[in-house]
Amino acid sequence: MSIVIARSLTKYYNSLKAVDNISFEINEGECFGFLGPNGAGKTTAMSIIYCFMPPTSGTVSVFGMDVTERPSEIKSRIGVMPQDDNLDVELSVFENLIVYARYFDIPKKRASQVAWRLLEFVELKDKAGVNIRNLSGGMKRKLILARSLLNDPELLILDEPTTGLDPHSRHSVWDKLNYLKSMNTTIILTTHYMEEAERLCDRVAIMNSGKIVAIDTPARLMDTHKAGNLEEVYLRLTGRRLAD
Ligand SMILES: Nc1ncnc2c1ncn2[C@@H]1O[C@H](COP(=O)(O)OP(=O)(O)O)[C@@H](O)[C@H]1O
Ligand SMILES: [Mg+2]
């Protein structure tokens, strides 16, 4: 079953075409990756899926509902990890979760229980009372991951979940995402780490200048392009091939 269906999706920012007539479907339980250089349109495409802004033309449906018609219902069933950290720096780790839980109308007592469970899941329980300013980059990413799970989402949208993390924190995030996959959560992510895409993604869409230039499983892409790894395929398709 398709959780997300995009047809001829196009997005302009004034005269700049950020997403150029792309179509794709994302299946239930799948981990789907958007790959591509900076400015390719990945964040724009994802923000339309999570109902942050409407498409200029084309259609996107999530759980069978149009993003422009039923954004509240869609949002209540998805979790989002934006590209930039947007935690409330005035609050503690725990308070950030509690305040966010209000958006989903989760009752206070239940919010507290869920917050503790999620802090345990991302290994931040001992940081519950700490101010956001005193967290490392990796801890902030893990807290945002925990925050994205407050409403027990069926679909998770993660924009560069591991950018800037040290290898240990990256592996830790991979473990969490693999666990969520095993629980049948559908995941859409972007990453600049091809190893991450190969490890986590069932299928990837490689984007360049707003267009999808290839969409398939990492294995089939490597096979089609006779490449030893996904990075080679990526460099070839995005025209950023290293000198031979
Ligand atoms: N809010 C915005 N207003 C104007 N232009 C934007 C905005 N957000 C992104 N862009 C432009 O749209 C293009 C695609 O950006 P983005 O979707 O962020 O790409 P990616 O996530 O792949 O790096 C880029 O040229 C970027 O500069
Ligand atoms: Mg981006």
Image (spheres, helix red, strand yellow):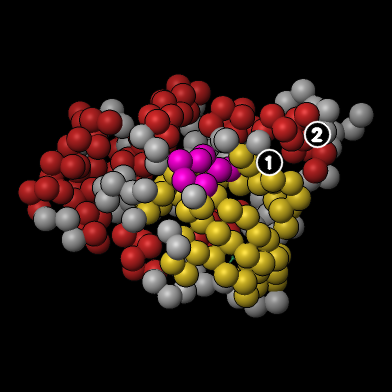
Q: Which residue is located at x 52 percent, y 72 percent?
A: 54
Residue 120 coordinates in the image, percent (x, y): 23, 30
**CA distance separating discs 2 and 1:** 10 Å
Q: In the picture provided, is 126 more to the left or to the right than 137?
A: left
Q: Which residue is mark 1?
A: 216
Q: Which residues are magenta?
A: 27-33
In the depicted structure, whether residue 218 falls above or below residue 65: above
Residue 192 in sight here: no
Which residue occupies the foreground of this view, 235 or 32?
32
Q: Which residue is located at x 36 percent, y 61 percent?
A: 75
Q: Which residue is mark 2?
A: 224
Q: Is mark 2 within 8 Å of ligand 1?
A: no
Which residue occupies the foreground of this view, 188 or 209?
188
Secondary structure at badge 2 equals helix
Q: Is mark 1 within 8 Å of ligand 1?
A: no
Q: In the picture provided, is 236 more to the left or to the right than 45?
A: right
